[in-house]
Amino acid sequence: MSMLSITFSPQLPRDVNTLVLGVAKDHKLGPVFDDLEASNQALIKQLIENKTFKAEAGEVLPVYGQGDVALVMLLGLGDDLSTAQKALTVGGKAAAALEKHKIAQVALAAPFCEDDPLSYVLEGLMLRSWRFDRYKKSNAVPLKTVTVVHAASEGLASRFSAQSHVTESVLWARGCVNEPGNVLYPQTFVDRIRAFESLGLRVEILDKARMTALGMGSLLGVAQGSDYEPFLAVVHWQGGAEHDKPLAFVGKGVTFDSGGLSIKPSRGMEEMKGDMGGAAVVMGLMRALALTKAPINAVGVVALVENMPSGKAMRPGDIVTSMSGQTIEVLNTDAEGRLILADALYYAHKHLTPRAMVDVATLTGAMRFALGPSYAGLFSPQDTLAHTLDAAGTTVGERVWRLPLCEAFTKAMESRVADLKNISSPGFGAGSSTAAAFLERFVGDTPWAHLDIANVDFNAKDTDVATEGGCAFGLRLLYHWATKVAPSLTL
């Protein structure tokens, strides 16, 4: 689980014998190429001229040569790295190739004229080189150090610093998602959150007694089957003016979801250690805001529970009373995420009075059928909020797709015996939209959006920008939106 260190230098370091050399489609090679041995230069030019290497975006070709730099990895930059997704992929493919060749230390040189493509390439390197291997004995050689060779190295280092803090926070969140349920449960998650106080964040933890006094019967109902006590963590970042309303981010934190008495099939249940992905994203976001000293006010609220079957567990047919006073008929104990978010959202709305609120949750398996593995689901009744979140996702390469909310979905969640039910009637369909419509009942008049990341937050195998396991999808999107877009937004 070592984290990649990226440094910057105006010239090629003497102690590095592997060079990643970026090559654009126009075959510009940059000044570092001129410092290589003549025989290496000739070989590289020959490979390009005979089209053995075509410089397609993400193409990698190792070239073994002579002299101090014994291995040159040609890295194709293509003819257009104008989007974050393309640049991230180039960096990710370079990291995968270096991992395959067991290279721990490398220099990177590329003819970049602008910061953005290079920053995203480096981010792709960081994201793809990290692997959750805390409990595994391995002979693998992780990539540890990348030295970026560039004439403007000092300025690049300064500008990349904030982005690296965000990327490190993504990796922190991925680590949380990948931890097994016997290691990361509500109390130990709280312990990790309390450590944020050293970063300048104010941490408030609501325990079971406090939540009971507040009337959080929906959240507590989910938790009652587990031996682990539930918590609501509220983390404040005060980087803006004292009286500015904060942005609120709310995360689902089910540290293990067995489904409760509506128990899940055993196949694949082990992945339910990651059902706290939304909480990891929100806490990782708060960490990034503190590390970058973002000039905004923000608060992160995460509901932390474990959903287990037992003699104390909530039963199908039970009716719980939420903090809002609305009663909920529980028809399926495996639709628990919306139950804990109901109280977390209402708490944020009532006690924090945010100017806008975004929740993040691995909420519905239906997202896999709706959007596959490429887009997260975005729901919001406010067009401005939805459009700006969509644009932020496109900017950083975390794409979302807006799905509908309408009166029909709201009505589908009405119960015959309570104010609401936690799932719609069999055969109604639209499971992701009805879940979002349920959540909307708990946000009051606060501008609100919901990100359902159930289909994008856990990889069964390595991808271009993430290794197997948790992804922390949405953290980079929300950081960009919160710091670059929301400050000037009228909601």
Image (cartoon, rainbow, N blue to C red):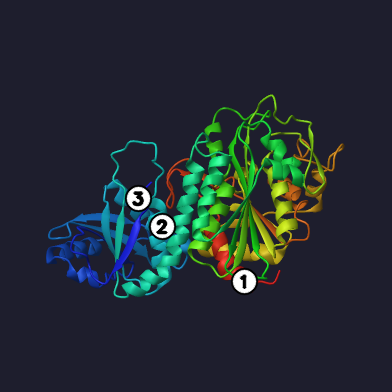
Which residue corresponds to the image point at 46% horizontal and 46% vertical from the top-left? Answer: 175
Which residue corresponds to the image point at 32% horizontal and 64% vertical from the top-left? Answer: 7
Horizontal and vertical percent for residue 63? 21, 56
Q: Tell me, yes or no, if residue 47 can be seen here.
A: yes
In this rendering, the answer to whether 48 lies above or below 196 is below
In this rendering, the answer to whether 353 lies above or below 330 is below
Amino acid type, residue under disc 2 in the picture: Gly
Q: Which SS class for mark 1?
A: helix
* Residue to which mark 1 is pinned: 487
* Residue to which mark 3 is pinned: 96
Amino acid type, residue under disc 1 in the picture: Pro
Q: Which SS class for mark 3?
A: helix
Which residue corresponds to the image point at 18% horizontal and 69% vertical from the top-left? Answer: 35
* Contact? badges 1 and 3 (CB < 8 Å): no
Q: Which mark is residue 124?
A: 2
In this rendering, the answer to whether 350 lies above or below 469 is below
Horizontal and vertical percent for residue 420? 81, 42
Is residue 75 rendered to the left or right of residue 292?
Answer: left
Query: Of the residues tagged 1 and 2, which is closer to the observer?
Result: 1
Crowding at label 2, few (<14), some or many (≥20) Cα neighbours within 10 Å? Answer: many
Crowding at label 1, few (<14), some or many (≥20) Cα neighbours within 10 Å? Answer: some
Lower sequence index among marks 1 and 3: 3
Q: Can you name the residue that lies furthest to the right here?
A: 416
| Closer to us: 425 or 190 | 190
Lower sequence index among marks 1 and 2: 2
Calculate the distance from the C-alpha at mark 1 to the C-alpha at mark 3.
37 Å
Amino acid type, residue under disc 3 in the picture: Ala
Query: Of the residues tagged 1 and 3, which is closer to the observer?
Result: 1
Which residue corresponds to the image point at 41% horizontal and 71% vertical from the top-left? Answer: 159
Residue 152 placement: quadrant: bottom left
